[in-house]
Image (tube, helix red, strand yellow):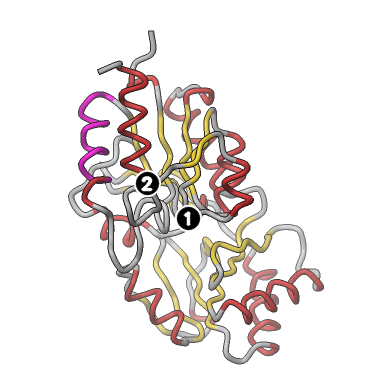
């Protein structure tokens, strides 16, 4: 007979678990606490650095380490330490940044390094909103002043500009050590090749001795898709794009802001325990 403790749930944060403006719906907090009290294992898989994840969760405790910076960091919040760090090829990323900044003079540029510290290379309203909405402290500096150990680069701008940056990046060759990843309509990121939420999920399962067929992923966007495909079961929230909903095993009735995660977890608890 299945037990809740057999399962490990990975939940995306923005527009799945919470919204930047409204935070985590109270029903999500309540049902996540119930799930973990009953033995279920719950964690987040996010593009956010640890500082931002901690601020958003508040007093909500994770059962296991988190996937941070879209998979570049595995972070243990219980012991406040980085378990694994993946770094960009800085020379290749620097060339891409320089060309994109020249081609698109209004695009915002951020580099996350170290344990997720954010360095703002070019500020714009979108980088400012990023800092405010995700409770991030940023350091404004030229690219050459960013310390080694880059985790990812974030280009931030209006949806049309970000789309054009993505098209431009596809037309250029910046080596094979990094890749471009759209993470929302207003963000395009550079990530280390072979690194993402899916690879981080597999690594964390290995660390914990968790069976992949007992993993569940809840997500809403294209950067969740690989992780959803590799999980034992996948759930898309109602506000996800149609392609993400079509790829999921299940779609919630509620949107993120209505408490989609709480809706799914409550049904899952009932399904497994029969209570």
Q: Which residue is drawn at 50% across and 52% down?
A: 220
Q: Residue at x 41, y 62 (%)?
A: 116
Above-or-below relation of 140 to 193: below
Picture quadrant of residue 106: bottom right
* Whole-number angstrom distance, CA of label 2 to CA of label 1: 9 Å
Above-or-below relation of 213 to 230: above
- Residue 244 on the magenta segment: no
Mark 2 / mark 1, whichever is N-terminal: 1
Q: Nearer the viewer, residue 69 or 239?
A: 239
Q: Nearer the viewer, residue 154 or 14?
A: 14
Circles 2 and 1: CB atoms closer than 8 Å: yes
Q: Locate the N terminus and report the quarter of the image it occupies.
A: top left
Instruction: Give the residue at mark 1.
Output: 239
Report x, y in % for residue 273.
30, 17
- Residue 33 on the magenta segment: yes
Q: Residue at x 56, y 41 (%)?
A: 227
Tell whether 74 sits left or right of 266: right
The outermost residue toward the front is 253
Above-or-below relation of 135 to 59: below
Neighbor class of circle 1 (other Cα within 10 Å; few <14, some 14-19, many 20+) is many
Q: Which residue is drawn at 54% across and 70% down?
A: 187
Mark 2 residue element: helix
Segment colored magenta: 28-39
Mark 1 residue element: loop
Which mark is drawn over residue 76? none
Which mark is drawn over residue 260? 2
Q: Locate the C terminus and report the quarter of the image it occupies.
A: top left
């Amino acid at each position: 007979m299945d037990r809740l403790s057999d399962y490990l749930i990975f939940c995306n944060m923005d527009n799945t678990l919470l919204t930047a403006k409204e935070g985590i719906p109270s029903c999500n907090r309540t049902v996540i606490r119930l799930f973990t009290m009953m033995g279920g294992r719950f964690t987040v898989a996010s593009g956010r650095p640890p500082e931002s994840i901690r601020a958003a969760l508040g007093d909500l405790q994770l059962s296991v380490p988190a996937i941070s910076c879209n998979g570049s960091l595995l972070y243990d919040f219980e012991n406040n330490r980085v378990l694994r760090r993946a770094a960009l090829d800085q020379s290749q990323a620097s060339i891409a940044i320089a060309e994109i900044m020249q081609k698109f003079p209004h695009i915002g540029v951020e580099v996350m390094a170290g344990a997720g510290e954010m360095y703002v290379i070019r500020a714009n309203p979108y980088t400012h909103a990023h800092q405010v909405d995700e409770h991030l402290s940023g350091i404004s500096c030229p690219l050459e002043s960013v310390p080694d150990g880059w985790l990812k680069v974030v280009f931030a701008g209006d949806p049309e500009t970000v789309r054009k940056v993505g098209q431009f990046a596809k037309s250029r060759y910046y080596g094979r050590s990094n890749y471009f990843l759209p993470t929302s309509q207003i963000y395009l990121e550079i990530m280390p090749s072979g690194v993402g939420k899916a690879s981080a999920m597999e690594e964390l399962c290995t660390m914990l001795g968790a069976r992949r067929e007992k993993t569940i992923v809840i997500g809403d966007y294209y950067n969740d898709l690989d992780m959803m495909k590799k999980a034992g079961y996948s759930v898309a929230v109602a506000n996800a794009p149609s392609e993400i909903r079509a790829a999921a095993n299940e779609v919630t009735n509620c949107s993120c802001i209505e408490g989609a995660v709480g809706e799914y977890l409550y049904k899952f608890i009932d399904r497994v325990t029969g209570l």
